[in-house]
Amino acid sequence: MKPRYIHIGSWNIEHFGRVDDPPNNQYAIAEHLELSGVSILAVQELYITDDFPAGGPLGNKFLRASLDLVEEHTDHHWEYEIFPNRDPSDREQLCGIAWNTARVTKVGDTLRVNVSNQVVDDNGERLFLWDRHPHAVKFAARPGEDAAIQLTDFVVIPLHMKSNVGQRHVVMRTRYHEARELMAQIGVIGDAFDERDIIVLGDTNCKRRDEGAIQAFIESGFEDLNEDDIPTYAIGNDAPFDRIFIPRGAERKTFRFSRQYILRSASPLAHDKYLSDHYLVKASIVVRRDDDFGVSEVAAAGSGMQA
């Protein structure tokens, strides 16, 4: 039976690699990842471990060990990448992405999105943006038996936006400008990858859908799959931080049945202890013949993603 869906998720794994995680934690992470059923996972709060030298590929030995445990049980090999922060020497709380090579193929090179890292607000205050600098990665569903048929491909942009540390009005304005900077580049990203199926997902740190940052995504043609502000934070009941955004429009057949799901534990305290203070969120997209339009149409669509 041919797989009909690809499951895409996001997970803030809370300081993963900051200290030596015991083997039990790696088994817990691997079990949770396998249970989730995702083939692509955007990851936040990765730390660079000491056995990866400066100047080389960024790596986290604990994530590698967890992915190897999944492979040991499923025979599916996983790859991952970690993206540099705004400060390229920063080794803490980085974003990354992991993928199941048996289900999807990475297409081309990772794109470091050309967003500004600071802006002067309307009131003259300088705000520093995107400490966790956004990157875009293109994937394609593996063709399976008929390699001549090009199946669904899409671009994934993992997020980790400004935290809630600081004055509330300042952090909210910062996130608003972060969102606007990213949305201004959506047409460029589509052009670079010749792709209109773009998924933006991760830890927004936004507590309410009416926050300016979320509205900036929506006004640019994306649908917020956590529009009811369902909490995704294991140790709080008012934090719908983790969200998945897809192109808006029912005619987008790839996303017609996409909904956000939250992989909750019956014991939030145990989840926080062994896994993370965040829940993993996921959504599915339909695997079908690819239906993208070309570069010229992406450019014509501008910064919005409306079909």
Image (tube, rainbow, N blue to C red):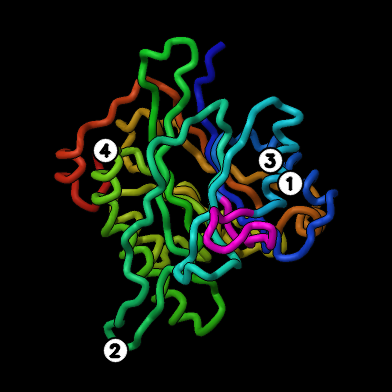
**Which residue in the protein does label 1 denote?**
29
Provide the secondary structure element on which disc 3 rests. helix
* Residue at the (41%, 47%) spot, across then down: 110
* Residue at the (39%, 76%) spot, across then down: 173
**Which residue in the protein does label 3 denote?**
67
The C terminus: image quadrant: top left
Q: CA distance from mark 1 to mark 4?
A: 35 Å
Of marks 2 and 4, the one in the foreground: 4
The image position of residue 240, as x and y in percent, is 56, 59
**Which residue in the protein does label 4 denote?**
194
Q: CA distance from mark 1 to mark 3?
A: 9 Å
Q: Is residue 110 magenta?
A: no
Q: Is residue 155 visible?
A: no
Mark 4 Cα shell of 10 Å, populated few (<14), some (14-19), many (≥20):
many
Q: Which residues are magenta?
A: 43-59
Provide the secondary structure element on which disc 1 rests. helix
Q: CA distance from mark 1 to mark 2?
A: 44 Å
Q: Quadrant of residue 37?
A: top right
Number of marks in the rendered image: 4
What residue type is disc 3 on?
Answer: Leu
The image position of residue 84, as x and y in percent, is 49, 61
* Residue at the (33%, 43%) spot, across then down: 248
Of the pair 270 and 24, the residue shown nearer to us:
24
In the image, taking residue 114 as reference, residue 96 lies left or right, namely right
What residue type is disc 4 on?
Answer: Asp
Q: Is residue 56 magenta?
A: yes
**Which residue in the protein does label 2 denote?**
124
